[in-house]
Amino acid sequence: MHNMSALNRTATIMNTSAISTNDCLFDDSGVFNPEILRTGNQEDQQRELYNWMLGEGSSVFIKWVPDELVDDHIARQYFGHYGQVDRIDFVPKVNEHGKKSGHMAFVHFHRFNTENSFSNDVASSYPEPFETDFRAINRNNNAKVFKLKCCVNTRPIPKVLEFNASQITDMIQNMNLRIAAETAERLRDKEEIRNLKDQLAAVLQRLDTLEIPSVIAATDALVDSVAELCSEMQ
């Protein structure tokens, strides 16, 4: 049987085909509490999802966004259709091979736009992401469509901080992977230079008995180039 979200389960029990914001159930504060959403029971989750959907300062987490969207102006234009954007945090992602693979995004809203269903769709999909399309034109003037998987951000951060602990941990892990990959690449470069030096030494031995000015000049230039490259790799 398909697992329904907290809001969908509630809508089914109430025999409604859609969730109306007029039926929202708020706690005393009406402020979204992510800890209760993560750990509470079904009724708690329903209340907090409603608080998130209609409250101020709610945010959306997107696990991956393409490079075409990693621009504050473009991103604000795109997400501005869904509400009044406060700020957007982009966090680099690095795969297990140490290669950059796009960014994560945290979109923080002052409030959502009630004239469209975006916040309702995201809340109704919880804990699964809600997919929405982002269309872009690349440098070759070709249209591309990307699927953005938007989730309720269950670890929102205060505006006074740049990143919270979880985001910093992700960034440190990504940085460690990048450093490891760059270190491995430098080691490969050094190995190639050592091989080049060995090949050069073998060539010099074979040319040692020759006294051709043009060969001597070319050899000296090559020796100087390799020496300079070696010094740069130190």
Image: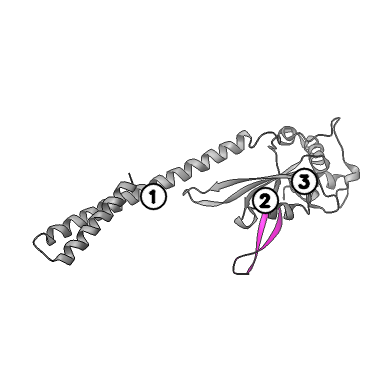
Residue nearest the observer in this picture, 119 or 87: 87
- Res. 72 mark: 2
Q: Amino acid at mark 3?
A: Ala
User: First in sequence: mark 1 or mark 3?
Assistant: 3
- Neighbours of disc 2 within 10 Å: few (<14), some (14-19), many (20+): few
Residue in the picture at 51% in, 49% down: 95
Residue 180 position within the rendered picture, expressed as x and y whole percent measured from the top left: 43, 43
Q: CA distance from mark 2 to mark 1?
A: 32 Å
Residue nearest the observer in this picture, 116 or 182: 182
Residue 185 position within the rendered picture, expressed as x and y whole percent measured from the top left: 39, 49
10 displayed left or right of 168: right
Q: Which residue is mark 3?
A: 123
Q: Secondary structure at mark 2?
A: helix
Q: Are marks 1 and 3 in contact (CB under 8 Å)?
A: no
Residue nearest the observer in this picture, 56 or 117: 56
Q: CA distance from mark 2 to mark 3?
A: 24 Å
Q: Amino acid at mark 1?
A: Glu
Q: Are marks 2 and 1 in contact (CB under 8 Å)?
A: no
Magenta highlight range: 129-149
- Neighbours of disc 3 within 10 Å: few (<14), some (14-19), many (20+): many
Q: CA distance from mark 1 to mark 3?
A: 44 Å
Q: Secondary structure at mark 1?
A: helix
- The residue sitting at the bottom extreme is 141
